[in-house]
Image (tube, rainbow, N blue to C red):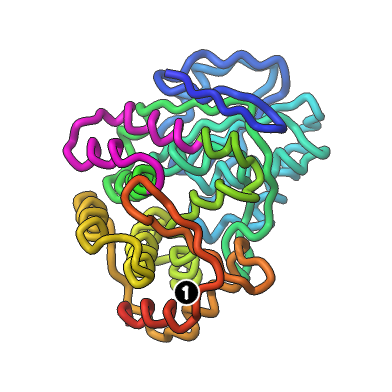
Amino acid sequence: MKVEVKTNSKTYDIIIGKLPEIKLNSKTAIITNPKVSGLHINYLLNKIKAPEIQIITLPDGEEYKTWQSVEYALDRLFDAKFDRNSTLIAFGGGVIGDMTGFGASIFLRGVKFIQIPTTLLAMVDSSVGGKTGINNRYGKNLIGTFYQPEYVFIDTYFLSTLDKREFNAGMAEIIKMAVMFDKEFFEKIKNNEISLEEMIKRAVELKAKVVSLDEKEKGIRSVLNYGHTFAHAIENLTNYKKYLHGEAVAIGMVMANELSKALGYLSYQEADEIKKLLEKYNLPTSFKIENVDEFFNQFFLDKKTLNNSLKFIIPEKIGKFKIIKDIDPNIIKKVLRKFS
């Protein structure tokens, strides 16, 4: 299966299925983490043909998505005398993919890179669309670039070793796409009427279409942040240690749904349907807010906030989204108090 992504800067393919042989005529660096390398590096090496292959291993986890990690990888590239014709391969989950893409975009002002995601979350979300970045003490992905890969290869073989919690975290992003854009897709997931590969393909198709329309998130691409404004606040307040990204997004979706209900859009029945589908995949749907004002102030650290004006993506109904700006802060805080 193949999905084409067309952007102003590049057109490329997302290949879904068994990993093909990858022939490269340049120095190649595989950037990965110890867990993925230990499980799957030989599988990947058997598929790659290149004049020289370096393996660069970075620590695993959101707390290592830092400038120090990227600098370490870049130093290894300089040590091995990589040049502008070189290729980087991101081989791991979203953290590795974001850091590799960011490194590729700034090494010698830009070299080619390929995404080979190994988690469901990365397959349907971070590997598609060219967002790259790192975290800092102010928040998540606040430093980064828009930089498209040459290819994305999605092979569900890698999911055979993914633990259930990580798999479920990826399902949160798939459900997010269905709620925003495709009610029929939502119903198929809910009723178990779709295979895993078909689910991945549909989620990727929806994201590719949005990215093609709005590569640099000036308009409709912001809709992909449904649940994320709340999720990033949760992740920041828990130091990225308590929840996987998809778990935080699941809670964020429930919070966004509460806001939609408070504004008179989403019905109680559909909000309940979404919550039940998230819970079907053992995703968390509640969070205790200790300090409502502190949580509210986290929104202003979000990179999507402009001129101190908050913007929220909410479902008007399943399959239809709404972008809301300049909401009365008292309404937002009233919603947050439901979680306190």
Q: Is residue 213 left or right of residue 231?
A: right
Vertical side of 248 occupied by 329: above or below: below
Q: Position of residue 244 (x, y in %)?
A: 39, 57
Using a 10 Å C-alpha cutoff, classify the residue at mark 1 as few (fewer than 14 neighbours), some (14 to 19) or many (20 or more): some
Is residue 208 in the magenta section?
no
Q: Amino acid at mark 1?
A: Leu
Residue drawn 40% across and 36% down? Answer: 203
Is residue 199 in the magenta section?
yes
Q: Nearer the viewer, residue 185 or 267?
A: 267
Q: Position of residue 234 (x, y in %)?
A: 44, 69
Question: In this orientation, does residue 251 appear?
Answer: no
Residue drawn 47% across and 19% down? Answer: 2
Give the quarter of the figure containing the C terminus: bottom left
Q: Position of residue 22 (x, y in %)?
A: 57, 16
Q: Position of residue 177 (x, y in %)?
A: 40, 44
Residue drawn 42% across and 86% down? Answer: 291
Give the quarter of the figure containing the N terminus: top left
Q: Is residue 154 left or right of residue 179?
A: right
Vertical side of 200 occupied by 256: above or below: below
Q: Nearer the viewer, residue 283 or 214?
A: 214
Q: Outermost residue, front direction?
A: 264
Residue holding disc 1: 237
Q: Which secondary structure type mostly characterizes the magenta part of the structure?
A: helix
Residue drawn 58% across and 55% down? Answer: 65
Question: In this orientation, does residue 320 appear?
Answer: yes
Q: What residue span does the magenta drawing correspond to?
A: 180-207
Based on the displayed image, in which of its 4 quarters is residue 19 positioned? Answer: top left
Q: Secondary structure at mark 1?
A: helix
Q: Is residue 198 left or right of residue 277?
A: right
